[in-house]
Amino acid sequence: MTIKEEQDNIIEEFSFFSDWDEKYEHIIQMGKDLPLIDPKYKTDENLIRGCQSRVWLHADYNNGKIYFTADSDAVITKGLVGMVVRVLSGQTPRDIANADIYFIDEIGLKSHLSITRSNGLLSMLKQMKMYGVAYQAKEI
Amino acid sequence: MTNSDTITDQVFDVESIRKDFPILQTKVYGKPLIYLDNAATTQKPLQVLQTLEKYYTEYNSNVHRGVHLLSQQATEAYEAARKKIAAFINAKHDHEVIFTKGTTNSINLVAYTYGRKFLKEGDEVLISAMEHHSNIVPWQIICEEKNAVLKVIPIDEAGELQMNEFDKLLTPKVKIVAVTYVSNSLGTVNPVREIIAKAHALNIPVLLDGAQAVQHMPLDVQELDVDFLAFSGHKMYGPTGIGILYGKEKWLNDMPPYEGGGDMISHVTFAKTTYNELPFKFEAGTPDISGAIALGSAVDYIQQAGIHAIQQWEEELIAYAYDKLAAIPSLRFIGDARHRAGAISFLIGNIHPFDTGEILDKQSIAVRTGHHCTQPLMELFHIPGTVRASFACYNTKAEVDELVRAIEKAKRMLE
């Protein structure tokens, strides 16, 4: 599945919810589905600092694709991380580096990508794209 | 001092107070706003907003300079505001009240100027473990510059200062004690009278961070005998960008100027500049004129409602909130001081405060989450932060009930 298709799937899932609490329960659920980072990678080096909640991210490169694992100490952030990992994990470095991530805005969580929210999601997206750029460079 | 009869006679009508604050009619996510982030900044009453508008529409002009009528009117209003603020804290002289940008700016002013003049290598500055970053970092900077040492009064589990440790730390090496009157994160009211008396016994001046105090309780600088008091306009129903440094005349005269520029000079030549007298010596450049005048209106507003009546109402409200919150299973208070004002900090089970804050926000309740600019304090408690509900005179018991209901929902969703 392409990055675009996966995002469209998420947008469709969210279109079934009319109340904010159902939406949040779904986000929290996706945090539970997140492929968890191996505790040995839960280091300061892999820590993405947001102002409030913390996110750890690890990338594995295998057969031309990048696989992400992650975790967060806040469950809503973890759910958002879970969605982004679902979208980007298993994609090629080039596709990750060039990805246009629009689903967060579409499902009404745009504020999570703003500087005021400072929950690390924006920094995490940047970091994932950096992995894309870095592994792309290795391939050449 | 107001006698106790007038205190109990004063009727505090919260519903009529609420009508003065237009923003309280706002809806967020389609529901009425419940604003419990007052320790960060309070909302502004119409009286303050109208003062700002009147200034800019009727007599906007620079102060202390112009020969023309508008400048005279602006200067009179600006100086009248200073008088109101001096009366509000019962300063002996109006010129002991310096307009600044806010508490942070006030503390930096003292740290830099007092520190530059009086701190020497090996001297000590004594702060407490519950200080806001704004009462830590300015002292760290000047201590580093002067090779002085920053010492910290520890706190106990309840979030109260360990006064026996304070006694041990208070030696003649200490050149200034800088502590908060009320903790912004925990709501603890510190025993400042005892601190000031003990410091003065060794001729050590005391700076109080009053940012979380002046809006909640009567404060008399002469009765406290405090040397410096810093506070912000925007936390006491006034505008942002304006604050106060109160300082005893003798200290302010002894301290060198902070910033150089217009208004703070008496005479300038390229060889030598002589400085203006107090308070202008510390007010370089065009000040926040509208902010100062509007802060005067905020003080009028508080005086009209009655600071004793506000205190009484808020104490009742906080006691009510405390009891209601205490009944929520797995909720634990962070800081459990016997004497508190303004704020209640808590956590629910192992739920991250950021998650709780977000679910409360969705239910139209504004609280603060995080470390509240007191990272060393959060480290002491081994927590990433807290959820803080902080109150102002316009909050109601019905809002507390809504908060409790919203927390219970957050618990169901997040646990």
Image (cartoon, rainbow, N blue to C red):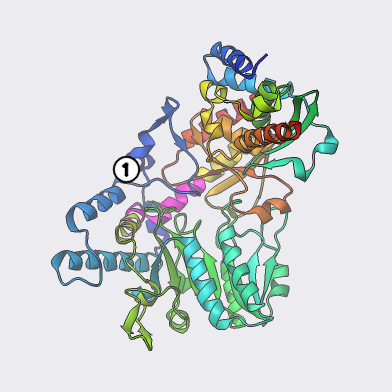
Residue at 48%, 48% in the rendered image: B314
How many badges with numbers are in the image? 1
Residue at 29%, 45% in the rendered image: B46
> On the image, numbered disc 1 is attached to which residue?
B20
- Magenta region includes residue B327: no
Residue at 25%, 49% in the rendered image: B50
Q: Amino acid at mark 1?
A: Asp
- Residue B123, position as x, y percentages in the image: 66, 80
- Residue B180, position as x, y percentages in the image: 57, 62
Does the image show residue B414? no
Residue B25: which quarter of the image? top left
In this rendering, is residue B168 above or below B376? Answer: below
Residue B31: which quarter of the image? top left
Left/right of residue B332 with respect to residue B90 in the rendered view: right
Q: Quadrant of the N terminus of chain B?
A: bottom left
Farthest-out residue, right: A40
Span colored in magenta: B300-316
In this rendering, is residue B143 above or below B254? Answer: above
Residue A66: which quarter of the image? top right
